[in-house]
Image: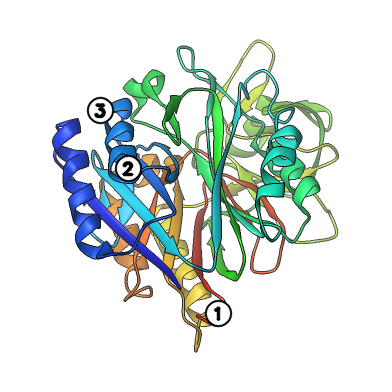
Amino acid sequence: MFKVIMGQTEDPDSLDAIKDVIEQCRKQLSKDKPSAGILYGSTEYDSQVIVDEVNKAFPGIELIGGNTCAEISSLKGYADGTLVLVLFVSDTIEIKAIVIKNIAKDQTAGIKPTLDNILPKFKEKPSLGILIAETFTNPNILVLNSGLLSFVKVLRSELGDGFTIFGGGTSSEVPNFNKIRQIYKTEVLQDAAVMLLFAGPIKSKVGVASGWVPFTSPHSLDEAKMNVVVKVEDKTGLNFYIDYIGGAPTLIHPLAVYEDAKQDKFYLRGPFGADPASGCVFCDGEFPKGAKVRIAKSDPDKIIHATGEAAEQVNDLSSNQKYQCAFVLSCFCRRQILGTRTNEEWATLSKFIKDIPVFGFYSIGQIGPYSQGDVSIAHTETCIIALLGEKNG
């Protein structure tokens, strides 16, 4: 048995809000006891107050969570300024929470010792994880923690390429970046990555689409420092953009990154600034060594259409199979570009995914495969839809 239940509220008072969502969940639980949960919502809520109440209601719960700039759910569709509690109930699937702290100093050093401690507590090796991670190394000056790509690769090296990871970075409205927190069991943290590990008969199907189309020829990324584009062949990152689009880059023109030049698979890195003096371009994610890059373009209509493409992918894949929920991640940058049209992402998605709980949020960075059967990587400016269910359930 594997059940997913949810509560959501727009109540602005932290204590009233968390009591409301807990009561909504209790009505659905009946006599069932949740083993794990995800708690997320606006930075306007007092994180410690809401975490304390969840632990009072469900002692010992394996809880993770964090702040989001906007929420997605089958209860309220697209919303911002809300609080969401998702609870997992199962007598067949083991779910445990882990945390890696101080990731700004070293994104990957804490992974192996954390896994060495938790894995012996499972009856079976985990095959799936839901990850929520800090986005900034310094929230006060908006320095991006760009190491999600390395973080995900190290997780895969420890747990195997068959281990599937879905997730994203915590986020907030721009004025509240310094308020962003992550949640682990009873703790409210900064500079942390938290994850639920699932072991046993868990299955997933994924749909991934962005809406961006590369339009330039491929070029060698000759020098990059984490998320900073220094040289594209013989040009600075900024001059590379100027040659093609006539000026400094914006989010509407991300870089399509090809790790393997022989394949047409790419992920995106969105530019959020450039330094005219050095010519460096600052992007929202890390670059691998030896990559090829192309500039991509899109528009709001294509972005919204891509959400439908991702939903169609899981809709086709899930025919004649039963799934218990859908986990949706869309990018903070997509929301920035769509503006007042952001709710059209949910309107499009909900045409395809019906009759199961849907939960998710707008994140800075999205983690998931290129497509079904691929290994998980760190995307940006992308929509990822993951169906989760119990095998033979």
Circle 2 SS class: loop
| Mark nearer the viewer, 1 or 3 | 3
Q: Mark 1 points at which residue?
A: 317
Tag 2: amino acid: Ala
Tag 1: amino acid: Leu
Circle 3 SS class: loop
The quarter holding residue 160 reads bottom right
The picture places residue 154, in percent across and down from the top left corner, at 76, 41
The picture places residue 134, in percent across and down from the top left corner, at 52, 30
Separation of residues labelled 3 and 2 (CA atoms): 12 Å
Q: Mark 2 points at which residue?
A: 70
Q: Which of 347 and 22 is in front in this view?
A: 22
Tag 3: amino acid: Glu
Q: Which residue is drawn at 38% across and 63% down?
A: 4
Quadrant showing the N terminus = bottom left
Q: Give the numbered dot on residue 44.
A: 3
